[in-house]
Amino acid sequence: MTDNSTPSEMTAAVWTGPDAVKTRQVPMPEIPEGWALLRIAYNGICGTDLAIMHGKHPRAQAPLIMGHEMSGWVEQAGASGPAAGALVVVEPLVSCGDCKSCRDGFAHVCRNLGLYGIDTPGGMAEYVALPPEVLHEVPDGVDPLTASLAEPLAVAVHAVELSRMERGDTVAVFGAGPIGILTALVARHEGASRVVITEPSDWRRSVAEGMGFNVVPEGSTMLETLATLTEGEGADTTFDTAAHPRVAAQLTDVTRVLGRIVVVGVYKTPAPINLRDVCFKEQTMAGVRVYTTANFTRAIELIASGELGLENFPTKTFGLDQVGAAFHAASSGQDCLKALVTPLTGKADA
């Protein structure tokens, strides 16, 4: 770095091995030619970060600065892209550009796909260096905290797009975690007549109810609830954001003839599914990896519009020196849907 006013060190949360993350001083990022330097505002913790934390991610190597759900300000502009001072969010995908998927314009399912914050340093720090093409400027008036939801929201946008959901559909969502609630919000925005959510956590069920969704009551099942609502037909479109074997076994049962099933959550191991139902009901199934750039842009538009009501999306913020508490909150899922780490002084909730 050539600016003598820029510090030589920064504070970062560094994953050092299974179940070990430490806040420490580290050198400022080196900025490759043409890249930008981002000053982090907020970084969300997701299920992938939890897998890394527990030493169960196949690619992550310690020591690592995790975090790929980033919002922040351009501290030093790159050769292209947003100007210094712009509030941006990060599309954190790293594709090879050489495989057939990349050549065909589907870089989000690159055979060698990587992510900033997993394969390279991420956003649980004061600064991160990134290529300008992954930075998306956020419209004026958007709060940096809400902006940090753009990455998981893009997953939901992609899931609803892949589902080919139609206006008036009855939609079933398994799981009321961050992706489940965001998928439900997008489905409703796109015209679902009703969205039915099933979730084992009492607290998360209350969140879903507070957002106006039909929630499967404790002691009942998605199949029973949908039977009453649809005269036994089942959901037109079903989203599995839970990725649990017990859910996989129900997907075809709760979905109507000629219905659509989208697997959004990532299963850790193969799970049984009733393929006979898929044939006899002529159901369509699709999987979700991440999102396209168009999905990411759409997520930013939805955030800027305020139409999803994300001000009611429960978040909790933690300083970099509270990163252990942040991971505990993300793991428990009992008082927030999204735990965020911030280097901003005075912005932490706990």
Image: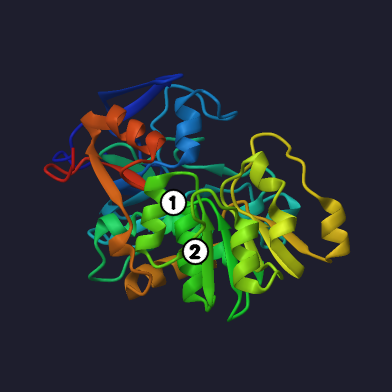
Image quarter (top left, top right, bottom left or bottom right) of the N terminus: top left
Comes first in the chain, label 1 or label 2: 1
Q: How is the image coloured?
A: rainbow
Q: Quadrant of the C terminus?
A: top left
Residue 134 showing in the rendered view: no
- The quadrant in which residue 67 appears is top left
Which labelled disc corresponds to residue 178? 1
For residue 14, above or below residue 348: above
Residue 184: mark: 2
> What residue is rendered at 51% in x and 35% in y?
119
What amino acid is labelled 2 in the image? Answer: Ala
| Quadrant hosting residue 213 | bottom left
Q: Is residue 143 above or below residue 326?
A: below
Q: Is residue 86 left or right of residue 56?
A: left
Residue 163 is situated, as x and y percent measured from the top left of the image, at 65, 67
Comparing 341 with 81, the one in front is 341
